Image (cartoon, helix red, strand yellow):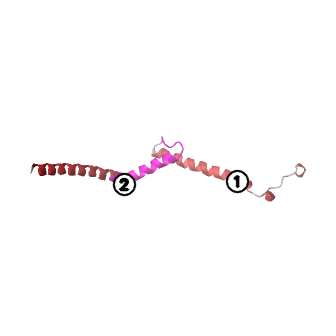
Amino acid sequence: MDDRLMMMMSCKKNSSRLMRISGRRRSRRRVKNSSHGRMMRKVKKLQKLIPGGKGLNADQLFVHTANYIMHLKLQCSILAPQHNLANLPPSQNLPVLESSAI
């Protein structure tokens, strides 16, 4: 009889411990799945993507990201014409102007 009582008490302790753990997990999930938690995860990802973004708070990070995007667009607009000229077949290269023609 004592063995059964000990076993029941042990089971009760384990079940209450499991309930405490599952309660903690639930609260972590709530925080993790909350809109604030989702936003913070996205901010962390953005901090990793943007050069120099790791030390910035969210407001600074968004401004820095906008500047970085503008910088990338400018680079693309400068490099695209150069890429197009470099890929022309030799027969379509622009003619070289003679100094007498100027």
Q: How many labels sit on residues? A: 2
Q: Which residues are magenta?
A: 29-54
Relative to 33, 46 lies left or right: right
Q: Residue at point 64% right, 49% down?
A: 75
Tag 2's secondary structure?
helix
Tag 1's secondary structure?
helix
Q: Which residue is mark 1?
A: 83
Tag 2 and tag 1, C-beta contact below 8 Å: no
- Residue 57 sits in which quadrant? top left
Three-letter code, disc 1: His
Along the viewing direction, whichever of 60 and 12 lies nearer the viewer: 12
Q: Looking at the image, is mark 2 or mark 1 earlier in the sequence? A: 2
Q: Which residue is mark 2?
A: 33
Disc 1 residue crowd, few under 14, some 14–19, many 20+, Cα 10 Å: few
Q: From what the image shows, is residue 57 above or below residue 96?
A: above
Q: Residue at point 77% right, 58% down?
A: 89
Q: Residue at point 74% right, 54% down?
A: 85
Q: Main secondary structure of the magenta part?
A: helix
Q: Is residue 101 magenta?
A: no
Residue 11: which numbered mark, if any?
Answer: none
Three-letter code, disc 2: Asn
Disc 2 residue crowd, few under 14, some 14–19, many 20+, Cα 10 Å: few
Q: Residue at point 53% right, 48% down?
A: 65
